[in-house]
């Protein structure tokens, strides 16, 4: 058995309001389609025809291996219509799996409405005037033109809801969507979206887009003209839809489409990447069934462990310990939970019940100062394994993956272990307390 390579990962951020919003902005910036290729390989939706098509892009230096997460994967989404705008609302591998979020909502900064040379506040209490008079020449020649000024440096949240993935007809967007290959030769990706405009409605009257090169402090969003559309060069951008820019209004009914995307699995690869075993070999050692997706299989290099999770959420593990493979049963967890293991600098963030695990690790609990902090605890690989093993021995303890929104704006996936929370991440059980047990709770 060779030493198993450890991969560097970006450090996990503190889950505070500002950083969550900034991370959302960074994610959506990275999802712009400037690097979207124009080659073939586009896949149409399954069943009912959708106005979009997709294709997969994988870095050449990251082979697709069953059971090993591929971090560089991007799903390219293209608007195939000639008279509609598409706004992306989500993307995920497999129905029920981990989805990308925060495509629609307020952003860090402030907005103000203007018409010609006259600025008017929109309720945010802040009037932004870029270049003194918001393009004086344009104000003189087009005194009736309306738009929105967006200042991203303001210490507030916008009073309008932005769309972070606006696709004009023919445009593309590249969505980073890491996943662990399970099926082949095809894998299913699901894209959520809304549409604006049709053959009888000019979409240009319904959309506001950045009207000049993005500035470090913000943008001016206006109805697009031909020059603006041409300057986008087929790339997506942030934007405002008149039907969805008011907070609390989602506008058009959201649609979703599934795509069976062909993937090129590595025919040969270094088995050290998966602990010296293929997924099928590891499954055979624990009695898991891969055929017809009865079990999802994941190898976590930092933990030197294979996880096999059935549809009933029963988990089997195969871990390299003391120069041998050790088989065990672990606690219940959703089939996609290991996708969230080791996301930040080889650490895993989760909400832990201090009454159950406080004697093992230093458990964080919720706090409320200027914002609500649900109390995520970061565990390294060994700590996570110890917690999962102890939780499995407790039988009644289950691990779950849920979506919360502590600030009511950005959403995030979190793992919970013996903790139940509401949609805002506030603990419903147990009641948080400042004390943690230093010895194991009585059986």
Image (tube, rainbow, N blue to C red):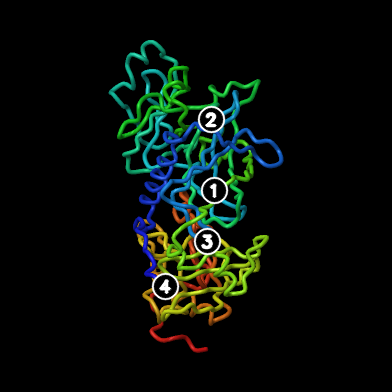
Mark 1 highlights which residue? 264
The reply to whether dot 3 and dot 1 touch (C-beta < 8 Å) is no
Seen at 57% across and 80% down, the residue is 395
193 is higher (above) or lower (below) than 332: above
Which of marks 4 and 1 precedes in the sequence? 4
Which of marks 2 and 3 precedes in the sequence? 3
- Label 3's element? loop
Mark 2 highlights which residue? 242
Mark 4 highlights which residue? 1
Residue extending farthest to the bottom is 442
Q: Position of residue 15 (x, y in %)?
A: 39, 57
* Alpha-carbon span between mark 3 and mark 2: 44 Å
* Alpha-carbon span between mark 1 and mark 2: 41 Å
134 is higher (above) or lower (below) than 110: above
Mark 3 highlights which residue? 67
* Alpha-carbon span between mark 1 and mark 4: 27 Å
């Amino acid at each position: 058995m060779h030493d198993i390579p450890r991969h560097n990962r970006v450090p996990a951020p503190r889950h505070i309001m500002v950083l969550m919003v900034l991370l959302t902005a960074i994610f959506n910036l990275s999802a712009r389609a400037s690097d979207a290729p124009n080659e073939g390989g586009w896949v149409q939706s399954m069943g009912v025809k959708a106005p979009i098509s997709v294709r997969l892009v994988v870095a050449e230096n990251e082979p697709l291996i069953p059971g090993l997460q591929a971090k560089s994967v991007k799903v390219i989404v293209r608007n195939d219509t000639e008279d509609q705008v598409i706004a992306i609302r989500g993307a995920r591998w497999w129905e029920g799996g981990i989805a990308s979020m925060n495509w629609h909502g307020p952003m860090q900064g402030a907005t103000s409405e203007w018409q010609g040379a006259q600025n008017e506040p929109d309720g945010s209490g802040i009037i932004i005037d870029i270049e003194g008079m918001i393009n004086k020449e344009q104000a003189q020649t087009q005194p009736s033109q309306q738009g929105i000024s967006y200042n991203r440096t303001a210490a507030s949240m916008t009073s309008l809801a932005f769309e972070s993935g606006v696709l004009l007809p023919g445009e593309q967007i590249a969505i980073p969507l890491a996943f662990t290959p399970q099926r082949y030769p095809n894998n299913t990706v699901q894209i959520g979206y809304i549409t604006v405009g049709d053959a009888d409605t000019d979409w240009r009257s319904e959309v506001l887009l950045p009207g000049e090169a993005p500035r470090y402090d913000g943008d001016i969003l206006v109805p697009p003209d031909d020059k603006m559309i041409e300057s986008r060069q087929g790339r997506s951008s942030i934007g405002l839809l008149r039907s969805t820019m008011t907070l609390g209004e989602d506008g058009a009914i959201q649609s979703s489409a599934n795509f069976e995307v062909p993937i090129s699995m590595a025919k040969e690869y270094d088995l050290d990447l998966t602990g010296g075993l293929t997924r099928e070999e590891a499954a055979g050692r624990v009695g898991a069934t891969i055929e017809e997706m009865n079990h999802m299989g994941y190898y976590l290099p930092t933990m030197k462990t294979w996880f096999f999770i059935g549809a009933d959420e029963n988990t089997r593990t195969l871990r390299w310990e003391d120069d041998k493979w050790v088989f065990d049963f672990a606690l219940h967890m959703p089939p996609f939970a290991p996708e969230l293991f080791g996301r930040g600098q080889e650490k895993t963030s989760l909400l832990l019940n201090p009454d159950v695990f406080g004697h093992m690790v230093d458990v964080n609990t919720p706090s409320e100062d200027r914002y609500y902090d649900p109390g995520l605890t970061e565990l390294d690989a060994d700590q996570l394994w110890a917690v999962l093993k102890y939780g499995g021995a407790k039988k009644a303890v289950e691990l779950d993956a849920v979506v919360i929104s502590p600030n009511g704006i950005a959403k995030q996936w979190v793992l919970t272990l013996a903790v139940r929370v509401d949609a805002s991440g506030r603990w419903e059980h147990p009641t948080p307390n400042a004390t943690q047990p230093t010895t194991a709770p009585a059986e």
